[in-house]
């Protein structure tokens, strides 16, 4: 590993320790928070069963169950798609057609 890259990595790790210990506070632009998504409420508004909702969204039935039971939270593209569905449930008709 190049010395510069190692120095950056070490500095990042040391910063993380200081933040964890409460010695340092991360700058606001480096703090990311995500609110929970109520997948069951979104699905119920669409009027679909879990299996049909999973197929429309492009994920597995088991994943939809995990989201609804709060064992997992949606991330990445599925999260964005669910947020779009939350704002406009009628999009589900277009998803079912794909």
Image (spheres, rainbow, N blue to C red):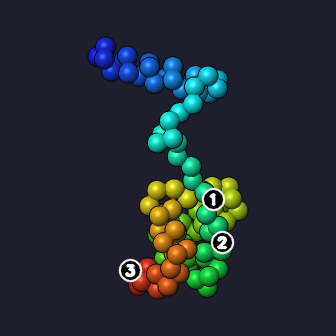
Mark 1 and mark 2: span between their CA atoms? 12 Å
Above/below status of 40 relative to 4: below
Mark 1 and mark 3: span between their CA atoms? 27 Å
- Which residue bears the numbered disc 3? 98
Please, what secondary structure does the residue beneath circle 3 have?
A: loop
Is disc 3 surrounded by few (<14), some (14 to 19) or many (20+) residues within 10 Å?
few
Residue that protrudes farthest toward the right in the picture:
69
Percent coordinates x, y for residue 17 in the rendering: 57, 22
Percent coordinates x, y for residue 71 in the rendering: 68, 55
Mark 2 and mark 3: span between their CA atoms? 22 Å
Quadrant location of the N terminus in the rendered image: top left
Q: Nearer the viewer, mark 1 or mark 3?
A: 1
Please, what secondary structure does the residue beneath circle 1 have?
A: loop
Q: Residue at x 47, y 68 (%)?
A: 81
Above/below status of 62 relative to 75: below
- In the rendering, which numbered label is found on residue 40? 2
Q: Of label 2 and label 3, which has the lower sequence position?
A: 2
Side of 2 relative to 77 (left or right): left
Q: Nearer the viewer, mark 2 or mark 3?
A: 2
Please, what secondary structure does the residue beneath circle 2 have?
A: helix
Q: Residue at x 62, y 82 (%)?
A: 45
Residue 55 can be seen in this image: no
Q: Residue at x 70, y 62 (%)?
A: 69
- In the rendering, which numbered label is found on residue 36? 1
Above/below status of 35 relative to 86: above
Is disc 2 surrounded by few (<14), some (14 to 19) or many (20+) residues within 10 Å?
some
């Amino acid at each position: 590993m190049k010395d510069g890259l190692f120095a950056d990595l070490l500095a990042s790790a040391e910063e993380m320790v200081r933040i964890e210990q409460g010695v340092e506070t991360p700058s606001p632009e480096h703090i990311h928070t995500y609110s929970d998504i109520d997948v069951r409420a979104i699905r119920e508004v669409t009027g679909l069963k879990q299996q049909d909702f999973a197929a429309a969204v492009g994920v597995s039935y088991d994943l939809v169950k995990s989201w609804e039971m709060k064992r997992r939270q949606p991330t990445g593209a599925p999260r964005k798609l669910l947020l779009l569905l939350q704002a406009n449930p009628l999009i589900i008709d277009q998803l079912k057609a794909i």
